[in-house]
Image (cartoon, rainbow, N blue to C red):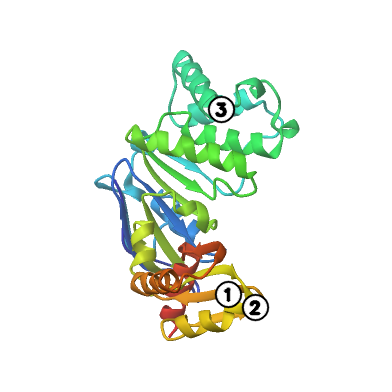
Amino acid sequence: MIRAIEVTKQFEEVTAVDHVTIEVPKGTILGMVGPNGAGKTTLVRMMVGILPPTSGTCFIGEKQSNLLTAEERARTGYMTQLKSLYPDLTARENLDFFAKAYGVRESQKRNELIAQAAELTQITESLDRTVDVLSGGTVQRLSLACAIAHDPNVIFLDEPTVGVSPDLRLEFWDYFHRLAKEGKTIFMTTHYLDEATRCDSVAMIFDGRLLAHGPPEELISSLPLESTISGIIDPDDSVQLKSALESIAPIEIKGRRFIVTATSGDVKFLIFEALSKERFQIRNIVVRQPGLEEAFTYYVRRGQE
């Protein structure tokens, strides 16, 4: 549904996006992660067709993004990182304006879609208040509602959850998954690596280059990333514990707490096997698994070597 093929964007001497190839199947959510300045927004702007690539091609469906007709473009929703709302208009007037701009000309149809978008984003009670008096969270909800008020098939969301509370972020994700189940295709950018695990696939970008792309669990499990196993042990057993584990994996003991570092599932098995065999009295065992943050750091370092 969404494709970029060898897309590059240069601004004079700066390469903002460097030969990126990526695709998003219909009814799925792709999360693009990377720090500020990595090229996420530039890539989105090329994908929606408002910024021409220096080289390469972007597609929405089977058509190049920059060649879409007004009618075809109206099937796409785009929530920009910078707020594009009119502060002196009410939430309803903003929704009406954007729905009309996307080609929904019939007033009754617009009213139905506005009511639906407001209900889904839970801003119905704020529809008749001007944007300048709304809370930050409500403004973010309204921005999302404006992007989907015309019921698009493809939705681009540029940092949709930035600056919002954790509970609102969870509500947004519930909504994103409902849209995907309805067959909508979502391409979103985020610098929250923890929430990217909620996507069907993750694309990691750094300095304009695509480092990795795939399901989040596969990106993590395919790398030699470290896990840690820690717990509290009786000081009298610390010497015996260290003797039992140091041949298996690096171990550190700080007072009553020990920390063992494992680089694979096999090593973790051997650690727990040794702990069980020696029958140490261990309390408060904590196993910390690697996540997308560790995977992203690994890919960045590998790309720089």
Instruction: Check the image and report above or below for 247 versus 44.
Output: below
Q: Earlier in the sequence, mark 2 or mark 3?
A: 3
Q: Is residue 206 visible?
A: no
Q: Are marks 1 and 2 in contact (CB under 8 Å)?
A: yes
- What residue would you read off at disc 1? 258
Q: Nearer the viewer, residue 146 or 271?
A: 271
Spot occupied by residue 175 in the image (x, y as percentages of width and height): 47, 35
Under circle 2, the secondary element is strand
The count of marks equals: 3
Relative to 21, is 295 on the left or the right?
Answer: right
Q: Nearer the viewer, residue 171 or 131?
A: 171
Instruction: Check the image and report above or below for 225 versus 125.
Output: below
Residue at coordinates 46% horizontally, 62% vertically from top-left? 292
Specify the amino acid type for callout 1: Phe
Spot occupied by residue 304 in the image (x, y as percentages of width and height): 45, 82
- What residue would you read off at disc 3? 95
Q: Nearer the viewer, residue 39 or 178?
A: 178
Q: Which mark is residue 254?
A: 2
Q: CA distance from mark 2 to mark 3?
A: 58 Å
